[in-house]
Amino acid sequence: MRSMAYGISLDIGTSGTRGHAVDLDTGKILSTSVTECHPLPGANIMDHLTFCINAGTDTAHKILIDTVNKLIATLDIDLNKVERVSICGNPIQLSLFQGIPVDDLAFAGENAHKARGITAQKRDAGVFSAVDVGLNVRDGCELCVPPAIRHEIGADALAMMYKSGFLEQKENCMVTDYGTNAEMALKIGDDIYTGSAAAGPAMEGQSIKCGMLAGPGAISDLEYDFQYICKVLDENIISQNGDRIDLALEKVTPEGPMSGKATGITGTGVIAAVSAVLDAHLWRKGKLTTSDGLLHLQDGVYIDSHDISEAMKAIGAMRAGHFTLLEHAGIKFSDLDIMYMAGASGTYVDAVKARGVGLLPPSCKTIYQYGNTSLAMSTDILRDPELLDELQGIANGIRANHVMFAGDPTFEQIYTQELAVCDEGMSMEMYNKNNAMVGIQELPKPKGTPKVHRMVERDIPDLGDRGLFILHDIGTELRAKMDGCTGCKKCERECPEHALSVTDDKGIVVKTKNCLGTACYRCQFSCPEKVYKYDNLKLTF
C-alpha cells in the first residue's frame, strides 16, 4: 500500500504568502499557513520590483524562498513525501519565486527593451523542478506554474477571472482583486480591459497604526445597529460580534463574544471606519475631528487621521482604475451592473459600505464576493495538473486590452481629484465639474441597495482540520558599514517602522520584513553626513 503523498499549494502575494498542505490521494486540505507580511523591503509591488532591480534577482529570490521554506515547514507534513507544489501570484512575485529576471517587467515597451538590451521572459504554464528553485522538498518534486495572460497580466488576474465566473458572464461586468496591487478587469462582450492600481498596503491592513492582515483578532467590520458594533475575526477567521461603539459620545461598551479579543484592524475594518467617519461627518480637510484626533474601537485598537487618509487614497486609486477602464472601453457607469470582488478585502468588506465610499462603481446592482481566488486556483492545479493546459488555452484566448495606469491621462486626472477630496474636502460637484472640463464622464451617486452574494464565509474557505497557522519569523537582515558614519543614530530614530538599528561599531542593520524600502528612504535622506547609501546594504545569509 502506497504511503500518503502530499502536495503544497501556494499563493505568493504582495502582502504575504499563503499555503495549503493537501492529501493528493483524496484532495483534502490538511493544514493552512500564512505569513504576516512580505519578506522583501517595501509596501507594494513596485517597491519589491525596485529592490530586485537594485539588489539583484538572486538576492530577492533567496529572501523570498527562505520565507516560503519557513512557511511550508509549518504545514505539519513530512516534506520528504511532497510530490507536487503549485503556485499562483502576479508576474513579479512568481518571477522572484522562480528566480526569473524582472527587467522586462520593470521597463515596459519594445523601445525600452531595445534601449537596455532586455530580453522578454516567457511566463507560460509549465512544470518545473521544485528543488531547483530552492524548496526544501524531495528530489523529483514537481512545481506547477500557471500562465500569465500577458507579461503585465499575471496568473493571479487569470485566477480572479476563472474562479469567479467573470469569464462566463454575458452581461457587462467588472472584477477586482482588492489588495495592495489591485488587479481589475472589465468585460464588454468578448473584449476584456485590464489594469492594476497600486492601491498601497492599507487595503491589507498594513501601514496602519493598529493594522494587521485578516486573521484571528482582526477587526474586520463595523456593523451599524443604532450604534456601531465591532466585528472581530475568531480563531477560524469568521466574523463575530465584539464591543459597541458610540461615535457621538466617543464611548466603547464591552459586548459580544469577541469582547477583549481584538488585537488589530484589517483592511476591511479600515474601510468600514472610513464609511463610519464620513457618515458621521468626522472628517474635515484631511483630519479626524474627534476630541483627540482618534477613532477608538475596542481593546485599545484605534484609527488615526493618517490611517483614514491612507485608506481614502487606496480607495481613490481603485476608483481611478475603474474609471479608466470604463473610459477606455467607451461605456458609461450606467452600463455596468455586475461586480465581482476577490481577495481578503473583497471577502470581508461590507459590499454596500464599499460601494458607498467608492471601492465599487456606484452603478453596481449585483455584487458577488469571493475569497482568495489565487490560492483557490493554485489548489485546483495541485489536485489536477492537467488544468495547466486548460488555463494556458484560456490565457491564449483572452482578448485583453491592458491599460498601463501609470502615465494614463484619465487615471492621473481622476486620482488627482480623489486626493483633493481626501485632503482638501473638495465637493463631488466640483469633482464632476473638473472631470467634465477634460471630457470625462460624471461619477453618479449610488442608488438603491445592491443585491450582494457572499460566495464564501471567509477569505480561505477551507483551512483543514488543523486550522490556521500564522508565521511571524520571516525575512532577514541587510547590513552595511557606511564610510564616514559618525554613529549619531539619526537614521535609526527617523525610521517609521523601527526596522533599522545602528550597532556599537557603527554598523547599519535593517530588518527586511519591516523596511518600507524605496517607498521611504527616510534613513538615507536624514543622514546629516550624507554618507548613508541604502543600496550599499547587503544580505546577511
Image (cartoon, rainbow, N blue to C red):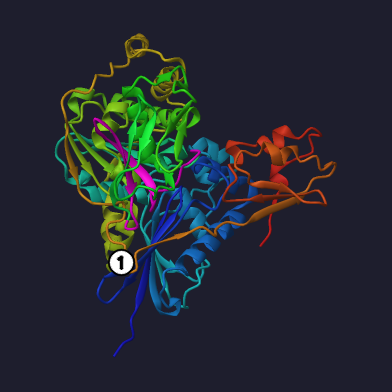
**Residue that numbered label 1 is attached to:** 464
User: Considering depth in this image, is 95 or 150 the residue closer to the camera?
Assistant: 95
Disc 1 element = loop
Residue 228 vertical position relative to residue 460 in the rendered view, above or below: above
Q: Position of residue 58 (x, y in %)?
A: 60, 57
Towards the viewer: 230 or 10: 230
- Magenta region: which residues? 208-236
Q: Please tell me which residue lies in front, 179 or 311.
A: 311
- Residue that appears at 27% across and 46% down: 161
Vertical position of residue 517 compared to residue 438: above or below: below
Badge 1 amino acid:
Gly
Question: Is any part of residue 395 visible from this angle?
Answer: no
Say which of 383 and 327 sits in front: 383
Which residue, as the protein is rendered here, is positioned at the far bottom? Answer: 1
Position in image of residue 402 (x %, y %): 36, 36
The quarter of the rendered structure image containing the N terminus is bottom left
Badge 1: few (under 14), some or many (20 or more) residues near its Cα, within 10 Å? some
Q: Position of residue 253 (x, y in %)?
A: 34, 38
Residue 228 sits inside the magenta stretch: yes
Q: Which of the image's four quarters has the C terminus?
A: bottom right
In the figure, is residue 371 to the left or right of 135? left
Number of dots carrying numbers: 1
Percent coordinates x, y for residue 245 in the rendering: 34, 34
Q: Is residue 264 visible?
A: yes
Taking the magenta stretch, the answer to whether it contains residue 403 is: no
